[in-house]
Image (spheres, helix red, strand yellow):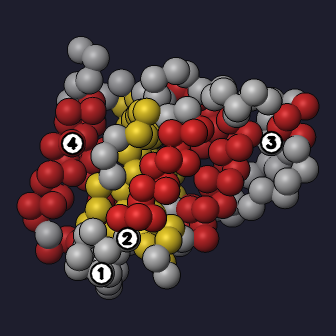
């Protein structure tokens, strides 16, 4: 079982990355392979709309997304996380999503393996985890249209300051257990 985590937070080792890391720890505890990418680690450009990926099955931009593409192509599960900024995913996370366009064929079928699941994961300062539910539903629809089998969205509220999620022990334990279940999936 290969689980790829993508942190769309511009803040290295912030709440989003910490939560994804808990899921990935659970994956490795269950014997799965976990890979983490953080947009804070490297420059990921936004899509330029050149449409080269429609003629050649590869994005023309040679940046860190190349490694993400390779990982997603072999993933059984993708954990896609972002902090909520102004009611939506971060600009950095959106750049990754836009670049996922290169993972689609001209007929809009995915180039990644059928059955790849995606766990949308959001952290937000707002304590009410249902506050942005309509936005999360739009994200689920978008990921479904890309060809992912979308798992129920995991939301961590009350995470305003960096590292604040560390006080939410039950939430972190739940994320780790979710990872254990993913890591043992298919065995």
Q: Nearer the viewer, mark 2 or mark 1?
A: 2
Residue at 74% over, 61% down: 46
Answer yes or no: do the residues labelled 2 and 1 have beta carbons within 8 Å?
yes
Where is residue 32? Give x, y as percent: 31, 28
Give the mark, 3 or 4, whose residue is nearer the N terminus: 3
Quadrant for the C terminus, please.
top left
Q: CA distance from mark 1 to mark 3?
A: 36 Å
Near mark 3 (Cα within 10 A), the count class, few <14, some 14-19 or many ≥20, is: many
The vertical placement of 134 against 181, above or below, is below
Where is residue 49? Give x, y as percent: 85, 54
Give the mark, 2 or 1, whose residue is nearer the N terminus: 1
Q: CA distance from mark 2 to mark 1?
A: 9 Å
Where is residue 116? Give x, y as percent: 46, 28
Secondary element under disc 1, as helix, strand or loop, is loop
Q: Which residue is mark 1?
A: 126
Q: Nearer the viewer, mark 2 or mark 4?
A: 2
61 and 85: which is toward the camera? 85
Where is residue 44? Give x, y as percent: 69, 60
Answer yes or no: do the residues labelled 2 and 4 have beta carbons within 8 Å?
no
Secondary element under disc 2, as helix, strand or loop, is loop
Give the mark, 4 or 1, whose residue is nearer the N terminus: 1
Q: Which residue is mark 4?
A: 178
Is 2 on the left or on the right of 180, as rendered?
Answer: right
131 and 11: which is toward the camera? 131
Q: Which residue is mark 3?
A: 59
Answer yes or no: do the residues labelled 1 and 3 have beta carbons within 8 Å?
no
């Amino acid at each position: 079982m290969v689980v790829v985590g993508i942190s769309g937070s511009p803040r290295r080792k912030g709440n989003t990355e910490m939560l994804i890391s808990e899921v990935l720890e659970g994956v490795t505890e269950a014997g799965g392979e976990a890979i983490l990418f953080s947009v804070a680690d490297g420059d990921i450009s936004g899509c330029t709309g050149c449409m080269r990926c429609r003629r050649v099955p590869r994005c023309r931009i040679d940046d860190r997304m190349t490694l993400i593409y390779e990982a997603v192509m072999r993933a059984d599960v993708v954990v896609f996380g972002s902090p909520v900024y102004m009611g939506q995913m971060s600009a950095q996370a959106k750049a990754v999503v836009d670049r996922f366009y290169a993972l689609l064929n001209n007929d809009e079928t995915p180039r990644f393996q059928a059955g790849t699941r995606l766990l949308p994961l959001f952290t937000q300062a707002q304590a009410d985890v249902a506050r942005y539910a309509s936005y999360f539903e739009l994200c689920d629809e978008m990921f479904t249209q890309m060809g992912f089998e979308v798992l129920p969205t995991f939301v961590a509220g009350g995470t305003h300051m960096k590292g604040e999620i560390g006080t939410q022990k039950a939430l972190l334990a739940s994320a780790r257990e979710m990872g254990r279940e993913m890591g043992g999936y298919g065995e």
